[in-house]
Amino acid sequence: MKILQAINHYPVAIKTQVEQLIESEQLSDYLLNKYPQAHSIMSEKALYDYVLDIKKRFIKQSAPISKVSYDAKIQLLKHALGTHTYVSRVQGNKLKAKQEIRIATLFKQAPQAMLDMIVVHELAHLKEKQHNKAFYQLCCYMLPDYHQLELDTRLFLINSALNGNLYEKTK
Ligand SMILES: [Zn+2]
Protein backbone atom coordinates (compact mmCIF):
# COMPACT_ATOMS: atom_id res chain seq x y z
CA MET A 1 0.00 0.00 0.00
CA LYS A 2 1.66 3.16 -1.26
CA ILE A 3 -0.07 5.34 1.26
CA LEU A 4 1.75 3.60 4.10
CA GLN A 5 5.07 4.99 2.99
CA ALA A 6 4.47 7.81 5.48
CA ILE A 7 5.11 5.29 8.25
CA ASN A 8 7.55 3.06 6.40
CA HIS A 9 10.37 3.49 8.91
CA TYR A 10 8.27 2.44 11.92
CA PRO A 11 8.38 -1.06 13.46
CA VAL A 12 6.24 -3.80 11.87
CA ALA A 13 4.00 -4.01 14.96
CA ILE A 14 2.99 -0.35 14.53
CA LYS A 15 2.47 -0.71 10.80
CA THR A 16 0.25 -3.74 11.36
CA GLN A 17 -1.88 -1.82 13.85
CA VAL A 18 -2.26 1.04 11.41
CA GLU A 19 -3.23 -1.33 8.60
CA GLN A 20 -5.90 -2.80 10.85
CA LEU A 21 -7.25 0.66 11.67
CA ILE A 22 -7.46 1.43 7.95
CA GLU A 23 -9.06 -1.88 7.01
CA SER A 24 -11.71 -1.62 9.72
CA GLU A 25 -12.27 2.06 8.73
CA GLN A 26 -11.48 3.25 12.23
CA LEU A 27 -8.57 5.55 11.52
CA SER A 28 -10.69 8.75 11.58
CA ASP A 29 -12.33 7.66 14.80
CA TYR A 30 -8.97 6.92 16.38
CA LEU A 31 -7.76 10.41 15.48
CA LEU A 32 -10.97 12.25 16.39
CA ASN A 33 -11.12 10.48 19.70
CA LYS A 34 -7.61 11.58 20.56
CA TYR A 35 -7.83 15.01 18.93
CA PRO A 36 -11.45 16.15 18.97
CA GLN A 37 -10.71 19.71 17.85
CA ALA A 38 -8.79 21.57 15.19
CA HIS A 39 -6.71 24.61 16.12
CA SER A 40 -7.81 28.09 15.07
CA ILE A 41 -4.54 29.58 13.88
CA MET A 42 -5.68 30.60 10.42
CA SER A 43 -3.91 33.78 9.35
CA GLU A 44 -0.21 33.96 8.59
CA LYS A 45 0.11 36.71 11.17
CA ALA A 46 -1.37 34.44 13.85
CA LEU A 47 0.86 31.60 12.68
CA TYR A 48 3.95 33.80 12.80
CA ASP A 49 3.15 34.99 16.35
CA TYR A 50 2.48 31.41 17.40
CA VAL A 51 5.84 30.17 16.07
CA LEU A 52 7.71 33.13 17.55
CA ASP A 53 6.16 32.48 20.94
CA ILE A 54 7.41 28.87 20.95
CA LYS A 55 10.81 29.99 19.69
CA LYS A 56 11.12 32.62 22.45
CA ARG A 57 10.23 30.10 25.11
CA PHE A 58 12.77 27.45 24.12
CA ILE A 59 15.47 28.58 21.69
CA LYS A 60 15.60 32.31 22.12
CA GLN A 61 19.20 32.65 20.98
CA SER A 62 18.75 30.95 17.58
CA ALA A 63 18.66 32.73 14.22
CA PRO A 64 15.73 35.14 13.67
CA ILE A 65 12.81 34.05 11.49
CA SER A 66 11.60 36.45 8.84
CA LYS A 67 8.54 34.63 7.61
CA VAL A 68 6.18 31.80 8.49
CA SER A 69 3.51 30.67 6.07
CA TYR A 70 1.11 27.94 5.07
CA ASP A 71 2.24 26.49 1.76
CA ALA A 72 -0.01 24.52 -0.56
CA LYS A 73 2.92 23.33 -2.65
CA ILE A 74 4.58 21.12 -0.06
CA GLN A 75 4.55 17.52 -1.22
CA LEU A 76 2.99 15.48 1.53
CA LEU A 77 3.52 11.79 2.19
CA LYS A 78 6.89 12.01 0.47
CA HIS A 79 8.80 13.26 3.45
CA ALA A 80 7.98 16.83 4.23
CA LEU A 81 5.53 17.97 6.85
CA GLY A 82 6.95 21.42 6.65
CA THR A 83 10.10 23.01 5.31
CA HIS A 84 12.57 25.55 6.45
CA THR A 85 14.52 27.53 3.92
CA TYR A 86 17.37 29.91 4.10
CA VAL A 87 17.07 32.70 1.63
CA SER A 88 20.15 34.77 1.08
CA ARG A 89 19.55 38.28 -0.14
CA VAL A 90 21.98 41.00 -0.96
CA GLN A 91 21.02 44.25 0.74
CA GLY A 92 23.36 47.06 -0.15
CA ASN A 93 26.75 45.48 0.25
CA LYS A 94 25.64 43.00 2.90
CA LEU A 95 24.50 39.45 2.39
CA LYS A 96 21.56 38.83 4.69
CA ALA A 97 20.43 35.33 5.52
CA LYS A 98 16.71 35.02 6.08
CA GLN A 99 15.02 32.08 7.72
CA GLU A 100 11.60 31.07 6.56
CA ILE A 101 9.33 28.33 7.81
CA ARG A 102 6.59 26.92 5.60
CA ILE A 103 3.93 24.58 6.86
CA ALA A 104 1.83 22.42 4.56
CA THR A 105 -1.63 23.99 4.08
CA LEU A 106 -3.23 20.73 5.15
CA PHE A 107 -2.26 21.58 8.72
CA LYS A 108 -4.51 24.64 8.71
CA GLN A 109 -7.25 22.23 9.74
CA ALA A 110 -5.40 19.95 12.11
CA PRO A 111 -5.10 19.41 15.85
CA GLN A 112 -3.04 22.03 17.63
CA ALA A 113 -0.77 19.30 19.02
CA MET A 114 0.21 18.36 15.45
CA LEU A 115 0.85 21.96 14.51
CA ASP A 116 3.08 22.15 17.60
CA MET A 117 4.95 19.06 16.44
CA ILE A 118 5.64 20.55 13.01
CA VAL A 119 6.63 23.93 14.40
CA VAL A 120 8.98 22.31 16.92
CA HIS A 121 10.50 20.19 14.14
CA GLU A 122 11.18 23.19 11.94
CA LEU A 123 12.46 25.29 14.85
CA ALA A 124 14.86 22.52 15.86
CA HIS A 125 16.33 22.74 12.35
CA LEU A 126 17.45 26.29 13.14
CA LYS A 127 20.01 24.64 15.40
CA GLU A 128 20.50 21.17 13.93
CA LYS A 129 20.32 20.67 10.17
CA GLN A 130 20.37 16.87 10.27
CA HIS A 131 17.84 14.50 11.76
CA ASN A 132 20.35 13.24 14.30
CA LYS A 133 20.23 12.46 17.99
CA ALA A 134 20.80 16.07 19.05
CA PHE A 135 17.99 17.16 16.73
CA TYR A 136 15.43 14.80 18.30
CA GLN A 137 16.63 15.67 21.80
CA LEU A 138 15.89 19.29 21.03
CA CYS A 139 12.44 18.37 19.67
CA CYS A 140 11.64 16.41 22.84
CA TYR A 141 12.91 19.27 25.00
CA MET A 142 10.40 21.61 23.35
CA LEU A 143 7.65 19.00 23.15
CA PRO A 144 8.06 15.96 25.44
CA ASP A 145 5.44 14.00 23.50
CA TYR A 146 7.21 14.68 20.21
CA HIS A 147 7.65 11.09 18.97
CA GLN A 148 4.05 10.03 19.60
CA LEU A 149 2.85 13.24 17.95
CA GLU A 150 5.02 12.66 14.91
CA LEU A 151 3.50 9.21 14.47
CA ASP A 152 -0.03 10.56 14.95
CA THR A 153 0.69 13.35 12.47
CA ARG A 154 1.69 10.75 9.89
CA LEU A 155 -1.56 8.92 10.62
CA PHE A 156 -3.38 12.21 10.12
CA LEU A 157 -1.74 12.51 6.69
CA ILE A 158 -2.71 8.98 5.76
CA ASN A 159 -6.25 9.63 6.93
CA SER A 160 -6.45 12.86 4.91
CA ALA A 161 -5.39 10.99 1.78
CA LEU A 162 -7.95 8.25 2.40
CA ASN A 163 -10.89 10.10 3.92
CA GLY A 164 -10.33 13.81 3.32
CA ASN A 165 -10.63 16.49 5.96
CA LEU A 166 -10.92 15.00 9.45
CA TYR A 167 -12.89 17.92 10.84
CA GLU A 168 -15.38 18.43 8.05
CA LYS A 169 -16.99 15.06 8.27
CA THR A 170 -20.69 14.81 8.88
CA LYS A 171 -21.46 11.90 11.09
ZN1 LIG B 1 13.33 17.82 9.20
Image (spheres, rainbow, N blue to C red):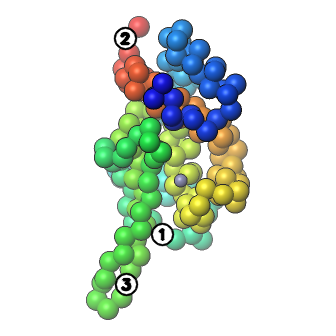
**Secondary structure at numbered mark 2:** loop
Please tell me which of labels 1 and 3 falls first in the chain: 1
**Residue 39, position in %: x, y?**
46, 34
Q: Amino acid at mark 2?
A: Thr
Residue labelled with disc 3: 95
Counting residues from the N terminus, which is met first, the one under dot 2 or under dot 3?
Answer: 3
For image coordinates 41% across by 40% down, the residue present is 76
**In the visual, does 171 lie left or right of 142?**
left
Q: Locate residue 67 relative to residue 138 in the image: left or right.
A: left
Of residues 21 and 116, the one drawn nearer to the viewer in this rendering: 21
Mark number displayed over residue 170: 2
- Could you tell me if residue 108 is visible in this image? no
Q: Quadrant of residue 145?
A: top right
Residue 124: x, y in percent? 58, 58
Query: How many marks are shown on the rendered structure?
Result: 3
Residue 129, visible in the rendered structure: yes
Check disc 3 and give the amino acid type.
Leu
Which corner quadrant of the image does residue 17 belong to?
Answer: top right
Residue drawn at x 68%, y 32% is 11
Residue 64's label in the rendered image is: 1
Separation of marks 2 and 1 at Cα, in angstroms: 42 Å
> Distance of mark 2 from mark 3, alpha carbons?
52 Å
How far from the left and from the top, in percent, is residue 119?
51, 50
